[in-house]
Structures are given as C-alpha cells and as structure tokens.
Amino acid sequence: MPVELEGKMIYTVPVTGVFITNMYFLIDEKTKHGFLIDPGASADLILQVIKRYGFQIEKILITHGHFDHIGAAEIVSNKLRAPIYIHEKGKRYITDPIWNLSEESGLKVVLRDVQYLNHGDVISLESNPNIMVHVIYVPGHTTDSIVFYSKEEKAAFVGDSIFKGSLGRSDFYGGDEVQLFTEVITKILTLPEDTVLYSGHSEPTTVGIERARIYKKVVE
C-alpha cells in the first residue's frame, strides 16, 4: 500500500528483490495521471497498487541503471504501455548485467526499449503539462545518475546519489567518489533548502539538513 508523504501526491512503495528499494509515484491529484520512478522489483505489487488507486502512469523514470532500480521496469512498461526514460549514459547499465550488478546476484536484468534523457530536459505529463520534472545530471554513484526535480512540489528524486545522513556509494562500475561529492554539492545541495530529497534507500530528508551536515563535516 502506498504511503502518502506530507499531504502531497507523492507516494512511496518499498519494493523487494535482492534489496529493498524505494519506488515512487508522482501523481497529478486532479487527473490521477503521473510518473512512476525506479520500479526496481515486485512488478505484480506495483501493478496492483496502480489498479487499486486508479493511477494512470504516463512515463516511467529511472534515476540510474542499477538492477534494483530497473528490475521491474520492462514488465510494468509493457503492461501499461508507458515508455521508460533514463539518462543517455545508462545504455551501458541497462544492457550489461555486470555493470548493472544483477549478474553477481544471480540475475541477468536488461532493458531493451528505452528513451534517453540529458541534463536540462523537462518531462511533463501529457494530461497536464503543468506537472513536470527537471532532469539534473549528477554522475558519481554511476555515470548515468540523474535527479528528477519538481520545483512545484519542492521535491527531488535523487536515486542513490545522496541518502539521509550520507552520500551514496561510489565503488561500483562507473562510480567516482570525488565526482559524486562535487556533483551533490553543486547540483543537489544548491536547490532550495526546503526541497525534500527522496532517495532509493533511506527516509526522506531535505536539502537544508544535508547541506548543514556536509558543511559541518567539511569544517571539522
């Protein structure tokens, strides 16, 4: 069952494969059309939730190509006929089970039909173009990591680039610790301080909280 956050039409559904990953819905309250973000596993559960709440998913958005964020994307996409969007550098991850880490877990996850994004792109709902997210490219966790930022909802879906209380890991294929720190500081923590950060594996936090934490750590 989705959990509504802060009275907004933003819902989280923890999906469980090898890991538990936070999957999100960003839904237009008037039309119930919206985006599905990071369907990493549990395709049947995702489809049940969508049916139960009457959501109409127009687009599936992927923050990065690790298997715990894309594992159910193809099944859900085919069932709903909703296109999948990922950064253009995600091609290596969605076609290579080694790079997307699924092979080491005994899986071979691939995606075959996607549309590619670049930094600065804006993705809107066809049913209500006023509902939109901005694409922010933040490599470091992976080479294809992006943030989906909704200025109107004061929300940023940050994948695994930053969590509540810590930065993401940078020791996987394509990761870079210095790059991750720089990109988070310059592209995520420069958003308005009341922006809520919705990550793949932690509770929500805010730009203000994480900015203060990181700056304090740097000073110390």
Image: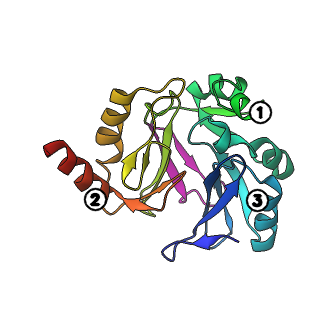
> Residue at position x 47%, y 27% from top?
175
Disc 2: CA contacts within 10 A as few (<14), some (14-19) or many (>=20): some
Residue at label 3? 46
* Real-space Cα separation, disc 1 to disc 2, in angstroms: 39 Å
Q: Nearer the viewer, residue 163 or 121?
A: 163
The boundaries of the magenta stretch are 120-137
Q: Pointer 1: residues within 10 angstroms few (<14), some, or many (20+)?
A: few
In magenta segment, residue 123: yes
Can you identify the residue that label 2 sits on? Answer: 208
Nearer to us in this view, 174 or 146: 174
Asked where in the image residue 11 lies, by quadrant, the reply is bottom right
Residue type pointed to by label 1? Gly
From this viewpoint, which residue is outermost toward the left?
Answer: 219
Quick one: label 1 or label 2, which is nearer the N terminus? 1
- Name the residue rendered at 65%, 48% in the picture: 19
Q: Quadrant of residue 194?
A: bottom left
In the rendered structure, find residue 81 and report the number of the disc placed on it.
none
Q: Is 167 located above or below residue 212 in the figure?
A: above
The residue pinned by badge 1 equals 106
Left or right, 20 with respect to 217, comes to right
Residue type at the position of mark 3: Ile
Circle 2 — which element? helix
